[in-house]
Image: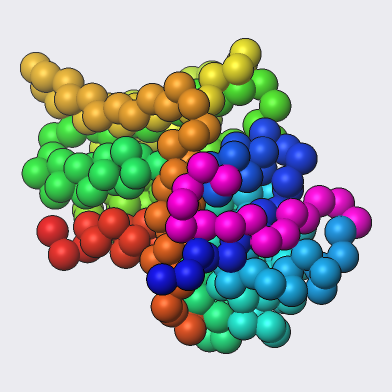
Amino acid sequence: MSALNIAVAGASGRMGMMLIEAIGQSPDTVLSGALDIGADLAAQLSGARVLIDFTRPEGTLNHLAYCAEHGIAMVIGTTGFDDAGKAAIRAAAEKTAIVFAPNMSVGVNVTLKLLEMAAKSFNEGYDIEIIEAHHRHKVDAPSGTALQMGEVIADALGRDLKTCAVYGREGVTGARDPSTIGFATIRGGDIVGDHTVLFAGDGERIEISHKSSSRVTYAHGALRAARFLADKQSGLYDMQDVLNLKVL
C-alpha cells in the first residue's frame, strides 16, 4: 500500500509542527504540503489526499471550501465554530469526507464513551459539573472538548445542552437547578488540557478525568483519523467513528 499524502494547516504553530513531526515518523504517511498564512492553497494541496487542520475557524472554513471543491478529505480539530461554521462543515461533508472532532486524543474519546455510560446511570440525584483548564494562550472558552463532554452527557440524559448549560455563576444565584450542567473554566500557564466531569450526589462524588501532558496525543489521534478517511469519498465523521466506539 502506498503512503498516505497528508497536508498540514497552521504548519508553523505548535500543533502544526507536532503534526509534521508525527507524519515524518510514521512509515505510512508522507507530508505533501504545509499551509500557513498567505499560502498558495493550490500549490500546497495539489498532492494531498487529506488536510489536517488545527487552526482558527475563519482559516479552516477557507480551507474547507477549497477541499470540498477538489475532493480533498479533512481532519478538523479546530474549535470555536459558531452554528454557521458547523453548518458549513456539514454541507462540505456532502462533497468530501471529514472527521470533525474538538479533541483528537484517543484517551479523551474513550472518556467521552465513559461519560455517556455514567450519565445514563447517574440520571437522577446527581449534579453535573464540567471543569476544564488550558494554557493562557487559548482564545475560546469553554474548550471544545468540554462542550463536547456536555453534549454527550446531555444527549444521554435526553436534555438539550443549549437550554441546560450554565457557563458562569456570580452573586446570589439561588439554589442549583438539578437539571442544569455547569461549566467552569481555568486559564493559566502552559496547561495542555485538563478536563474533569463531576457527578455529585448525596453521600458520594464520582469524578471522571482526562489530563493531557503533551499535544502528541492529539497528533497521533489526527493521524488515525486521516488513515480512517483514506478510502472515504464523503460523509461527516467524528473520533467515535474512527475508534469504532459507537458499537459499544
Between residues 167 and 117, which one lies in front from this camera angle?
117
Residue 88, image x and y in percent? 63, 74
Residue lying furthest top: 189
Question: Does the magenta segment cover residue 37?
Answer: yes
Q: In this rendering, does residue 27 appear at all?
A: yes
Q: Residue at x 78, y 64 (%)?
A: 44
Left or right of 123: which side holds 93? right
Q: Is residue 107 above or below residue 99?
A: above
Q: Residue at x 49, y 34 (%)?
A: 216
Q: Is residue 91 above or below residue 162?
A: below
- Which quadrant of the structure image shows residue 63? bottom right
Residue 90, image x and y in percent? 54, 75
Q: In this rendering, does residue 81 appear at all?
A: no
Q: Which residues are magenta?
A: 24-38
Q: Is residue 184 above or below residue 34?
A: above
Instruction: Quadrant for the C terminus, please.
Output: bottom left
Q: Residue at x 43, y 63 (%)?
A: 227
Left or right of 51: which side holds 152? left
Residue 56, image x and y in percent? 71, 50
Q: Residue at x 87, y 65 (%)?
A: 40
Between residues 217 and 130, which one lies in front from this camera angle?
217
